[in-house]
Amino acid sequence: MIVKFTKLSLVLLFTLSLSAFSQQKTVSGKVVDNIGAPLPGVSVLVKGTNTGTQTDFDGNYSINVSQGQVLIFRYIGFKTQEISIGESNTVNLRLEEDTQALSEVVVIGFGEKSRKSLTTSVSSAKMEDIKGIATSTVTGALQGSVTGLQVNQNSGTPGAGFSVRVRGSSSIAGSNEPLYVVDGIPIFSGAIGDNGFGGQDNDVLSSINFADVSSIEVLKDASASAIYGSRGANGVVLITTKRGKSGKVSVEVNSYYGFQEEIDRYNIMTTGEYFRFADTALAGSFPTIPAFASRGAFTGINQFAAQGFTDPTDQAQLEAFYALSFGDNFVNEIHKPGNIEVKQTDVSVSGGNEKATFYANFTDFKQEGVIYGQEFDRRSLRLNVDFKPTDKFNLDAGISITEADNSRINSDNNIFGAFATSVLETPGATLRDELGNFTPPTDFSFSNPLQNALEDDSDERTFRVLTNMGMRYFINDHFNVYGRLSLDRLDFKSTRRFSPNSAQGLGANGEIFKEILLVNNWNGLGTINYRQKFGEFDVTALAGFSFEGVNTDQTEVDRQNFPFGFKSVLNGATVIQGDNFITENKLFSYFGRAGVSYKDKLFFEGTLRADASSRFGNGNQTGYFPAVSGAYVLSEDSWFKNNIVTSMKTRVSWGQTGNQSGIGNFDSFFLTGSVDFAGTPGNAIVQLANPDLKWETTTQTDFGVDLTLFGKIDITYDYYRKDTEDLLLNRPLRNSSGFTTITENVGEMENRGHELSINARIFEGQFKWNSQFQISWNSNEVTKLTRDANGEFIPIDSGFASRTAVGQALGAFFGLKADGLYQTLDEIPAAVQARGIRPGDIKFIDINGDGNITADDRTFIGNPNPGAIGNFRNSFSWKGFDLSANFQFEIQKDIFNATRQFAGATGSAGFNKFKSETNFWTPTNTNTNVPAPRFGSAQSFNNQDSDFFVEEGDYLRLKEIVIGYTLPKDWTGDKYSLRVYVGGDNLYTETDYSGLDPEINTFGSANVSRGTDFFTQGLNKTVKIGFNLKF
Amino acid sequence: MKKFNKLSLIFLSVLVFSCADEFVDTEPQLNLPGEQQITNINTATDALNGLYGGLQSASIYSGDYIFLTGLFADEYRHSGSFPSFAEVGSNDPSINNIDVQQIWTAHYSAIFRANRIIELVPGLTNIDQSDRDIITGQALGIRAQLYFNLVRMYGGVPLVTKAPLSSSEIVSTDAPRETTQVIFTQINSDLNQAISLMNGFDQSTYAFNNSAAKTLKAHVLFEQGQYPQAKPFIEDVLNSGNFDLATSYASLFGDPANGTVANSTETIFAIKFTATDGNGMGFFFNNSRGGRFEVAPSSFLLSAFEPGDQRRGLIVPTGTNFQIEKYSRPGDGADDTYVYRFADVVLLYAEVLARENNFIDASFVLNIVRQRAGLSDVTLNASNFIDIIAHERFVELYAEGSSDRYNTTKRLGLLDNIIQLKPNAVFNPVRQNLFPIPQQEIERNPAISSADQNPGY
């Protein structure tokens, strides 16, 4: 009997224990980060099964699991943890940040990778660092944030264009700007419009809302950008916009308000100082007419007499006249007084659940310019949604609508613009009379600068819709297919008005020019993605196709001769222009990428893209762009493990990319054009067939090392060689053929450089200090151009003094060499003296020793491409306070200060001059570098292009400094998070450059005439206050 | 299920692969394909209008061809600022002179357009024979005129009678300087063909019609010294009944309101210009009339007129200078440019008669032109006829599209003396009063080297 009972109880016991093992229970808990904040969206998986869930907005999860099983907690950027399930039904967890740089996730073309597995050179711009910058265009915030990326704002006018270079320039005729991709869609970028209103560009990127951006990656080497094929040669900037996360709906409001002031303003002579200068200049050529300028040589107005003086030979009277300062300071008058504001407010709402998430944003940005009539504002709306209706099917969609208004004046880079004329006009007049009316433009040489700024204007409105929709279908665990369609639609309208009273409009009795440019850029893509692990090998592959088209429809109308007060084109009595242009181009591509990794430490990848473009000639319809790369993470090997170098990876890559931007849409076609003969229509052949026309090819090799020292200092170093060939250039044809040139792929250029980025997490506890130093060097050389009949390379001249020649950097400066001033007559060679040159004139060097200064004495005198660029950024945080400062620098670069050829002592004496020129050379004031004032051929002699105008453009600038305070949770409660901050942009600039700003480019993004300054507005410094509110 | 997926994938990729080529086919919207330039009567007519448009070039009948030849002779003096004009005014154009180069290039550009028509129109069966002949005839006549201008200015030049379709064709075709005989052979062949094709086509002052071709033929024969052979052509034009001298010289040259409109019976061939498609004759005028005053009448021209010569009336004082006002609308260039007028042919006739020693008839004919100008008669004889005819042509045809002063004085052997009389002019007899072959052509044309440059340059 006892035996029976024991058997039974044994069986019972056994059964009980069995069920204890197999019985599922619900385990729940909360996952937080290392400072205790809840982590939503953490993956919680039961190891060895398909069961899993995610934490909610408060970091809570709940899952069915059996005791003894293991839960895996995984979250991007944090160290994965595995917890065995014991008796307890609650498992709370604190995840540690995985601060190893290699765990960062990086967006690449058509996908994402962890930085560890990246075999190519891709830099990420950290959004926390750059999102506060008060700029109208997203590229402005990228300055001083990524190695190898040179960003310059071309002008200080609001909405001005930027020129961006990734690892130097590699094209002469095409664009050197990188390809911009927003959410996987290559968008229409660059300057548009046919303004002709001063020299500022209309940069279409100003219609991308910066507040929507969640990450920016720059694909720098060929291997990374080869997947963009014939458009990847200049690098690719991948912009990803924000998307919702599942959880409670969260709202974020960010706002800032800033006060701007120009960094520097031109300082011009007073009226008396100017007349002393001009009289001295004319005295040499008109010795019998004393005080000729003061008595009206240039303006016809005898200011000397008007101020009550009688005897121009009386030195005392002259001195008294020269001491006067009457009339307006034109430069000051055109600048707006008071607050020049810049402000932005953006509100975003995001949220969702496991099946659907959304992100919506509205942003309003406004920036005034420092001169009357300048303003840029933009309003934008975005909605991004993601649906996951089933496990196998995802849908993503987004739409963004932007309207940007840019008011500009006739200004930059233009001698008839308000900016230039305010400096150059002869002083002495007032801009308005006693009744407040404008002094008429006929009293001025170019225009009444204030009237110019207030009455002539150009209003530009850009309306842009970027929309896309994609679907992903998971065939199984290894394969998924993705398809997407998108549209980038840009409507650009510009109305330029010359008032009937202003200098520009007077002759025509008013002129209104209106342009309407409609751009439709649509594309679609389909990819199939594969991933599978085979033991220790992890294979990923991608194959796909894409098709794209850009249609442009441009209408220009222009009328003159308006009845008083009418402001619409329609009202003009004289038709000047009524034109419409339509053009299009298309691209069809196949691409594929395959990568394999071994034991998560050895990585290989290859890509191939084939592009067929409507622009390429029939002989070259398809281009092929291959790339291979590999990386080895040494620190994964056990023999490597040490405490100093805690992680190390070496990379090597090689690839070929193309640039088709230099080819017009129909450049390879045999074309007949319309030609009119005195009002009768006619036709004629206007273009010969050019079937060999093709893209420019860049072959790039990159060696890189990423290492981390002491677990705290991340260092990335890259060395690259970029060789570009098949550069598009005009090849001359014999004139007797009926055509003079044809475009051919003949040129070659090379870029060599290094990039170094050091990021140190010096302190990571309660007090955080992060320091970043980045520097990149690039050296550029043109190696081949078209040849003339003697086999010599033909140099290309452009801009003021820029020359592109073999053996020199692109757009190097070319001119005479100067060596101070002549002090005595004996120093001056006879042939030069015969031309009227005297002591006080510039001593040019006679390079060819022929006794005279001629065009043959010219040589290369400067290089506008910086030898090195970089930044130095420090961020601190402690108990809710945060402080960050970023210094940005460019060194070893030259600027050709063409403004001094007008407003400097060697410019025509009819123009006013900079204050610095009062220290001009005279026989009694010889210790100066300012040449003597001259007129006629001696003045033209001194004013020749030479290194007298070439200055060092090196600069160090405090790009941004911000102090912020996040209110403690005790005050705001758990629900709200509020940070307030105060900061400044461009507050401090250290440079030897005498002009307004060493960063600007008069010719915008033009390739071959960079580094020239001709009356271009400089940037502004801004002091701003703002807040970030989240709830 | 798996099989179905595989099949649809293959199907999709095949579909996708076949789309690529068609997809990137684009059609230019602003232009027609070159192959469609000349395919029917409409396009052939358009191409012909395009050829006339080519003659409107600033470097041909809109200005430079007229200015530079006149500056080289004693027709104008340089009163402006262009260094290139200054060089020609002192008879020392550099081989790099930009305007000398542009005249060359513009002529060849127009020759290209003529070549297209001559090559393609005769083969179009969808056009009436007579229309084809008239279009082709005009193109041939214009091509002859263009080569005639070139050979007189530059000497032997490349003979291009085929329009290349691609740059590789240009590069692979040899284009050396031909001798003047070869060029004249081509000119004569083109003209003979033009005259026969355009038999009876004399309408329209703006078309290079049968009479224009015959007038040109006469000039060509004169240039070659074949005066008796020229006579029938001159007589054809004189007797055609389509032309006559206008009653007043001044009426030929319009007024500021309407500009010069070549619609009188005197016009044999003129180039049409309008307000939106104007010429460059503003160079004759000073700023108050919207001009540049780059080119002014020379002292030789001013003193060439006899007292009472009404033709002097088209030169008008302006401040301390004089300006030629045969073109009335310098602001927008809406004046037609005469190339051949009836008076030109009358003077040719006078010369041809004089050369066959028929001085009575020669004088009679010459005096018709003089009477129109309000002058008394002169009598020609063996020793004076060359000078008198040269003088009469000078005062009748100055500042017009035929560039007559340079061409006639060169033909008559008078230009050497004329240049030596000009102050500040460089006389280099070796140059034979030719312009230099543009240096750019020499550099870009492998068949022409510096050794082939005209002597003296």
Image: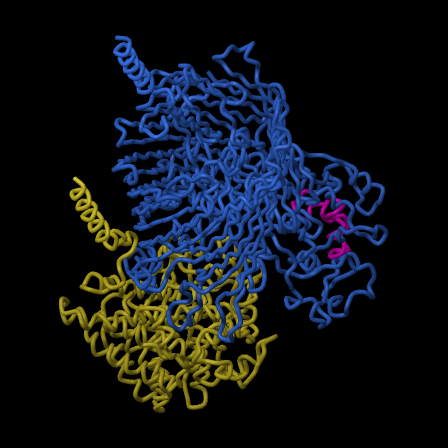
Where residue B301 appears, as percent x and y from the top left, is 50, 72
Where residue A277 appears, as percent x and y from the top left, is 75, 47
Q: Which shade of the palette goes to chain A? A: blue
Where residue B451 appears, as percent x and y from the top left, is 50, 84
Taking the magenta stretch, the answer to whether it contains residue A311 is no
Q: Which residues are magenta?
A: A275-301
Q: What colour scheme does the image use?
A: by chain
Q: Quadrant of residue A355?
A: top left
Q: Does A445 sit above or below residue A171? A: above
Most foreground residue, A931 or A82: A82
Taking the magenta stretch, the answer to whether it contains residue A281 is yes
Where residue A207 appears, as percent x and y from the top left, is 43, 34
Query: Residue B41, can we see it?
Result: yes
Left/right placement of residue B241 relative to residue A324 reads: left
Left/right placement of residue B373 relative to residue A451 reads: left
- Taking the spot 48% from the left edge, 41% from the top edge, the residue there is A116
Q: Quadrant of residue B197?
A: bottom left
Most foreground residue, A55 or A140: A55
Q: Which shade of the palette goes to chain B? A: yellow
Most foreground residue, A865 or B314: A865
Most foreground residue, A981 or A761: A761
Query: Residue A421, can we see it?
Result: no
